[in-house]
Amino acid sequence: MGKACFLVCLAILLANAETLVGRALLAQKTCPPPGFSSAQPFNLLSFIDGPWYVQKQVTTTYTPENFLYCVRANYIPIAGPGDLSKGVFVNNYSNKDRVNGMAATTSKSQGGLQLYATVPNATVPSQLQVGPYFGDNGVTTAVSSVSIKMSGQAANYWVVATDSSSSDPLFAGYEWAIITTRPPTIPSGDGCRTGSADGGIADVAQRGFWWFTRQQEAPAAALEALRKKSLELGLDIGVLEDVKQEGCDYSGAP
Ligand SMILES: *[C@@H]1O[C@H](CO)[C@@H](O)[C@H](O)[C@H]1NC(C)=O
Ligand SMILES: *[C@@H]1O[C@H](CO)[C@@H](O)[C@H](O)[C@H]1NC(C)=O
């Protein structure tokens, strides 16, 4: 009897253990999430139609904790309205320590290091690369090699989701967007995150995840849509921090 129980019980124990192991394996994340890609179809001209206000983001080298005030990005076509062939100026803006505090910007006309973005592969306009702009020398597609020299990595900028599709006949422009630096490769929280696994300087330099809205103060529905879509994409939203937008005065922002 004891021996029978021993065998049967062992079998039951093993079966349970197997289920537990099975569950653990199932719960184990695959990063990047299978099928993770950028938004398609995507209309870059509509995307840069106006400034984007950052509602949440992961802190980065250039946007540490004390710069999460009044963060905004404004993209201006270098070759003038409608021509994206030379890329777009990237005018980032944020305030230090408080709403309307000292301004940090990537606009050269305001003393910053001018950045610009290009689309390396025209068939995938939602995958951009951002790098420093050294004047109109005709080499405006060299973003990635410059960035690689500077940081060891091309500074990727992927629009991974937007509120609507630019192929929708009722499309009237984008209201929200999710941006990441690249597919998130590191298991984190309930999903995956961008950056590098070492958790050090390289990690902070390489990670990037932003919630953009067209309106300075995001409607609750847009925030809910951003949350829902981020989870659906397999992104860990636990890494995001709030950006203060209330009361920000952007009248002097590039
Ligand atoms: C500017 O902001 C974009 C996202 O809005 C980001 O991809 C880029 O790395 C930022 N660069 C700097 C220097 O702030
Ligand atoms: C551009 O992207 C398309 C679609 O992903 C791909 O098939 C093509 O190989 C890419 N071209 C280059 C030059 O990488």
Image: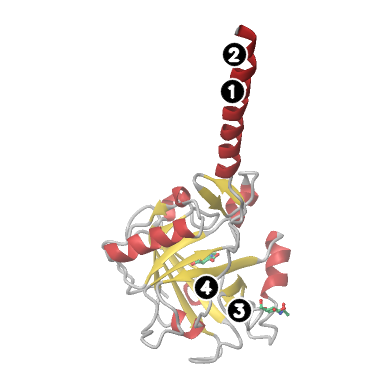
Other-residue count near label 1 (Cα within 10 Å), few / some / many at <14 / 14–19 / ≥20: few
Q: Is residue 67 left or right of residue 32?
A: left
Amino acid on which the number 4 mark rests in the picture: Ala
Q: Quadrant of residue 219?
A: bottom left
Real-space Cα separation, disc 4 to disc 3, in angstroms: 9 Å
Residue located 36% across and 64% down the image:
225
Closer to the eye: label 3 or 1: 1
Q: Quadrant of residue 208?
A: bottom right
Query: Label 3 belongs to which residue?
Result: 124
Local secondary structure at mark 2: helix
Question: Which of the two residues, 122 or 109, is positioned nearer the viewer here?
Answer: 122
Closer to the eye: label 4 or 1: 1
Amino acid on which the number 2 mark rests in the picture: Cys
Which image quadrant shows ligand 2?
Answer: bottom right
Query: Label 2 belongs to which residue?
Result: 5
Task: Give the answer, above or below, for where 37 lies relative to 87.
Answer: above
Query: Label 4 belongs to which residue?
Result: 39
Task: Give the answer, above or below, for where 196 lies relative to 85.
Answer: above
The quarter of the rendered structure image containing the N terminus is: top right
Query: Label 1 belongs to which residue?
Result: 13
Asked whether disc 2 touches disc 1, contact meaning CB atoms under 8 Å apart, the reply is: no
Amino acid on which the number 3 mark rests in the picture: Val
Q: Is residue 213 left or right of residue 161?
A: left
